[in-house]
Amino acid sequence: MQNLIIKRFDEAKTLLSLSSENAEILKTIEEISKTIISSYDNGGKVFIAGNGGSAADAQHIAAELVSRFYKERKALAAESLTVNTSNLTAIANDYDFTAVFSRQLEANARKDDVFWGISTSGNSGNIISAINTAKNIGMKIIGFTGEGGGKMGESGMCDLLIKIPSKDTPRIQENHIFIAHIICEIVENGLISA
């Protein structure tokens, strides 16, 4: 049992090191933070979505923005598209599951808002559909994926994309929330100092 525990800690440390040494990931974290700050400066809102563990991450990130991260400050407009069970079940029933996020964006998002889609494979149909709707609205699109990026990694799909260099879903998700916390801190600092 201890061998497994140590193995998982070692995997997590190795992947965090790989990500922290990746110049593209570091630059993209900065650009995502600037994009979110700019949206907030213009009265925008951040919409976040994912499936399974990534749905939990979407809620987690939205809570960090709406409540607070480290500092006392004004609440920031953020919404996880995964939490309204009436919307999710009605849309899935009336249309299909690929529309559960895109339909909510169609109803509530506007140009210059941000859509933050999370999919470890980069191929989740409802995230791809939401990205296409976000493009039509004129939103900025942030993607979080794993190695390769899947469909989300295709040219022009996302404005900014973090691709964690791994195919192991739990390790990818751990890096996603770690990086999301960094982004929340930068956004909070940027808005307070502005």
Image (tube, helix red, strand yellow):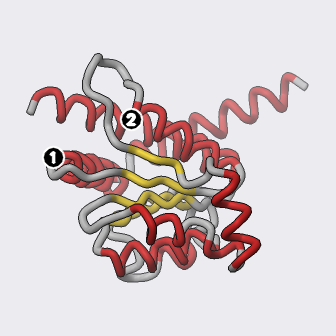
Say if residue 21 shows up in the picture: yes
Would residue 19 be found to the left or right of residue 82 on screen? left
**Residue 171 marker:** none
In the rendered image, which quarter contains the N terminus?
A: top right
In the rendered image, which quarter contains the C terminus?
A: top left
Residue 22, compared with residue 155, is above or below; it is above
Would residue 51 be found to the left or right of residue 106 on screen? right
**Image location of residue 63, percent across then percent down:** 48, 33
User: Which residue is the site of mark 1?
Assistant: 41
Residue 67, compared with residue 54, is above or below; it is above
**Residue 65 marker:** 2
Give whichever of 67, 146 is nearer the camera. Answer: 67
What's the amino acid at mark 2?
Answer: Leu
Structural crowding at the residue carrying mark 1, measured as other residues with C-alpha within 10 Å and reported as few (<14), some (14–19) or many (≥20): few
**Image location of residue 178, percent across then percent down:** 49, 37
**Image location of residue 149, percent across then percent down:** 53, 70
Q: Secondary structure at mark 2?
A: helix
Would residue 72 be found to the left or right of residue 182 on screen? left
Say if residue 15 shows up in the picture: no
Residue 177, compared with residue 6, is above or below; it is below
Give whichever of 128, 181 is nearer the camera. Answer: 128
Give whichever of 179, 132 is nearer the camera. Answer: 132
Q: Based on the displayed image, in which of its 4 quarters is residue 106 positioned?
A: bottom left
